[in-house]
Image (cartoon, rainbow, N blue to C red):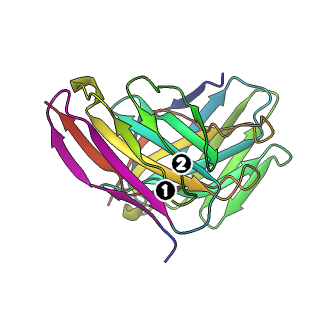
Amino acid sequence: EAQVTQNPRYLITVTGKKLTVTCSQNMNHEYMSWYRQDPGLGLRQIYYSMNVEVTDKGDVPEGYKVSRKEKRNFPLILESPSPNQTSLYFCASSLSQGNTEAFFGQGTRLTVV
Amino acid sequence: GENVEQHPSTLSVQEGDSAVIKCTYSDSASNYFPWYKQELGKGPQLIIDIRSNVGEKKDQRIAVTLNKTAKHFSLHITETQPEDSAVYFCAATDTGAGSYQLTFGKGTKLSVIP
């Protein structure tokens, strides 16, 4: 089954404790992105990757890091999480720039206390 | 960069009635306009999209219209059913920009009342 898998689905952590949210897709997609969803603000892009070893900032990259060492994986790293990073996070992938349907994961609800 | 405005933020309709959600965009270079549906506890899922060389597209009860001159596009759902209740997001992007940045509206929570 074609899918984007995020882990964990739920995470509660403390301020400053480094964490990684994993994202994996099995569709051989070139493009992958991370979004955060906050009430009243919709979906805002954090980082995106156009292919292996090619990443770029989205609209709200501060406090986040990403890496794309393999085509299928695109982890989101919070080196020192803060309470304002409490949010619902989504990973998405798409085949290419021209074929732009984005397939989303199930989401990761992160709480930073 | 692109800015997408979406209205209304909430919409309640009686089952069987029509629902219309409207979006405006700022970047005249944008040429791809998808609509996503997000059900409770799930990730957004593409339901319909339109490209700038087309003025209207229909898929069963769902249709999207695009007015490039006015820079707005709309989602129309006819004969609404309870399973249409969800949050809907419009989005816009320029597929020829050399990057991949899909800009979303803030979402519309649609409630279909049985």
Q: Quadrant of the C terminus of chain B?
A: bottom left
Report which residue position mark 1 lands on.
A73
Q: Which residue is mark 2?
A: A68
Contact check, label 1 and label 2, Cβ < 8 Å: yes
Earlier sequence position, callout 1 versus callout 2: 2
Q: Real-space Cα distance between discs 1 and 2?
A: 6 Å
Left or right? Give the position of A14 relative to B26: left
Q: Nearer the viewer, residue A6 or A70?
A: A70
**Magenta region, main secondary structure:** strand
Kindly identify the residue that appears in the image at 73 percent across and 49 percent down: A97
Q: Could you say whether the residue bearing mark 2 is in a helix, strand or loop?
A: loop
Q: Chain of mark 2?
A: A
Direction from residue B6 to residue B24 in the image, left or right: right
Numbered range of the magenta stretch: A4-25
> Given the image, on which type of amino acid does mark 1 rest?
Asn
| Residue B61 is covered by the magenta coloring | no
Label annotation for residue B96: none
Magenta segment includes A24: yes
Residue B27 lies, in percent from the top left, at: 73, 25
Q: Amino acid at mark 2?
A: Arg
Camera-nearest residue between A101 and B14: A101
Secondary structure at badge 1 equals: loop
Q: Position of residue A102 (x, y in %)?
A: 58, 54
User: What is the x, y in percent for residue A32?
Assistant: 56, 49
Foreground pick, A98 / A19: A19
Q: Is residue A22 left or right of residue A94?
A: left
Q: Is residue B105 above or below residue B95?
A: above
- In this view, B5 is above or below A5: above
Horizontal and vertical percent for residue B56?
A: 77, 51
